[in-house]
Image (cartoon, helix red, strand yellow):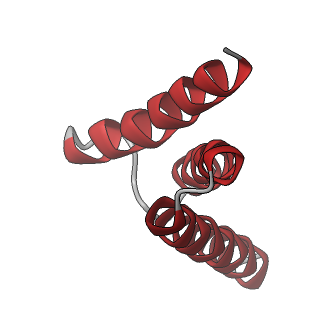
Amino acid sequence: MLMQVVSIAGALMVLSAFAAHQLKRLGHETYAYQSLNLAGGFLLLLAALSVRQTGLIIMEGAWTVISAWGLWRVGRSVRSTR
């Protein structure tokens, strides 16, 4: 039951970032977009690990790492413009 809640929360985070970007409400070079993807991907990774779904572990692990890199890149660009 707990992992269902975790996976739903993760999916809602990733999907809300995607929808906001598609609707031009949120740019991909923002903390909010990258943070939603990072947190959502991580929650989905936890859910995948709990049921040992190898394909999902790879997918969500990559999503989390790529999102962490995107968040780092956004932070770096913000610092360089100051």
Give percent across and percent down for residue 46. Answer: 71, 48
Q: Quadrant of the N terminus?
A: top right
Q: Position of residue 16 (x, y in %)?
A: 40, 33
View extreme (left): residue: 23
**In the image: residue 76, left or right of residue 15:** right
Which residue, as the protein is rendered here, is positioned at the far bottom? 80
Q: Residue at x 33, y 37 (%)?
A: 20
Task: Pick the quarter of the image with the C terminus.
Answer: bottom right
- Direction from residue 44 to residue 79 in the image, left or right: right
Q: Residue at 37% x, 37% y: name it.
A: 15
The residue most toward the top is: 1
User: Which quadrant of the figure has residue 26?
Assistant: top left
Please give the name of the residue rendered at 47% of the width and 35% of the height, measured from the top-left corner: 11
- Residue 59 in percent (x, y) is at 47, 68
Whole-percent x and y of residue 47? 64, 42
Looking at the image, is 37 positioned above or below residue 64? above
Could you say which is closer to the camera, residue 6 or residue 80?
6
In the image shown, does 19 or 75 lie closer to the viewer?
Answer: 19
